[in-house]
Image (tube, grey):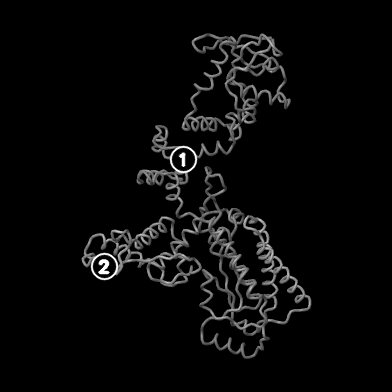
Amino acid sequence: MSAIIQVTEQNDLVHEVIHLPFYQLCASDANVRQTPPSGIEALATNIQAEGILQNLIVSPVTRGKHKGKYAVAGGYRRWLALDLLVRQKALPKDTPVPCAVIAPSEAMIASLSENEQREPMHPADRFDAYKKLIDAGKSVEQVAAVFGVTPLTVQRYLKLKSISPKLFALFRQDDITLEQMQALTLADNHETQERVWFGADYWGRQPQALKRRLTEQDIDAERHPLARFVGLEAYEAAGGRIRRDLFSTGQSGSLIDVELLHQLAEKKLADLSSQLQAEGWGWVEVVQSPSDIYTFDRLPVSLRAPTPEEAQRIQALQDEQQRLAEQMDNLAEDETEQWKTLSTQCEAIEKQLDAIQESQKQYDIEAMKQAGALLYIGLYDGTLHIERGFVRRTAQATDAAQAQADSVSRPKEKPIHSETLIRRLLAHRTAALQVELANQPKIALAVLVSHLAASVFGRRSDTQAVQVEAKTFERDLLAYADDLESSPAWKAMAALREKWEAQLPTSEEDWLNWTLNQSQDTQLRLLAVCVALTVNGVQNHAGHPHKR
């Protein structure tokens, strides 16, 4: 059963194209594809939606178990896709398949020619094809089915329509790579795209450099503390827009409506403030960081004796915590996953003990009317922190706090944890912090820059836990060369130092917070200055620094 439908030319020979029922086709030993092909499911979807748009190349089988059939020398992926549809009963076994019939002696050459001579479509042409189909009324899903790709792939290519025509022309000429084009789509207007591209040097045009330039002022949807505090669901429910990077493998994006985000955060904090005032506190204040707490005085508080049930619970939790800590000490170096599990259990117990202790606190009702609570949002994770029992540093608040201290008899408090256990837990917590910081390069960069800048510029830092040291050599260099201060290089370095001195925070509690709020470009520039100021190139013939 066959019917000649057209004539096709291949290798300067004319071959007839006929329709053969699928069941008459089989695999060919002459097919050069030995590696199992991929994307068969997507191709099957495409064939089901649009039919077979290109004929197969087959040769008659004259011997063996497949005698009387036609072996597929070219179009093997299409034959596998058809086989999948037949096995799924999406197509009947006698589905007519267009085939160009060649002699068995030509099969190997035809297979190699089809696979080697095929030139991949330029991404610009693929974009044009997608866009024409969309403009003709096709949906993204329909276009994806036609080309055998995912809907996300179609969306990614259609995103390129936001590119400036000038840049797209360069892209078609291969003067801009696809990765660079993808980075430029992070800007929605042509003016910004062109300014960033034409205003950058070679290194500034690398995809990552372009992304940094276009997103340095953005609010990261996943990592920014304010975004995590408000929550993306609440933000989007209020009409907030998120610009997502379609070309990223993750779900990253940037919050566009910054003012709305701040309004939602303020409302959430206002609601929490009302709840705290309902507890009896005279005022509630939002502070920027934990260090701001030290500008207030603590309202004296007494701890009521635990109830028998609480005492029993506390003892059980402490015993369990001690047992877990001992297990952690006995673990081998390669048992990191088990250590993480035990550490998480210890932290959960610690939170339970803190909650019990918090419930035992007692404040004088009258003193609470003059005192308040503080709220702050975690700098790294956006977690809300509530601290109760503070008085402002005024004469009146101090007198009220002192009167409260005189009127309340505070029972002698027994430490909840032993010193050994505290040190052990702090050591484990430090290790956990190291792992977390190692996986947060942006925060690690800010911590390093903050610590080095404080050291280089002679200030105290709020990152004392970081044991990184820096030493400058200005005095040594001036001792080696008494005319150094008149050199252009020294004057340029002095100007840079003076410029940064004017920008850096004056309070030691503000260093890390200030650094985190700077763009990564600013952080890197400050890091470069700090590293430069530690350079000492004065060496003797043995290669060691001169000693004075």
Q: Secondary structure at mark 2?
A: helix
Rendered position, 301 above or below 266: below
Closer-to-camera residue (415/90): 415
On the image, the x and y values in percent for residue 14 come to 53, 8
Task: Locate residue 504 relative to residue 119 in the image: left or right.
Answer: left
Quadrant of the drawing holding the N terminus: top right
CA separation in Å, label 2 and label 1: 49 Å
Closer-to-camera residue (3/532): 532
Mark 2 / mark 1, whichever is N-terminal: 1
Rendered position, 410 above or below 197: below
Closer-to-camera residue (478/359): 478
Closer-to-camera residue (430/6): 430
Task: Locate residue 163 relative to residue 64 in the image: left or right.
Answer: left
On the image, the x and y values in percent for residue 183 come to 46, 44
On the image, the x and y values in percent for residue 440 come to 53, 56
Q: Secondary structure at mark 1?
A: helix
The amino acid sitting under disc 2 is Leu
Residue 188: which numbered mark, if any? none
The amino acid sitting under disc 1 is Glu
Return the residue at label 1.
Answer: 179
User: Dot 2: within a 10 Å radius of its alpha carbon, few (fewer than 14), some, or many (20 or more) residues?
Assistant: few
Return the residue at label 2.
Answer: 478
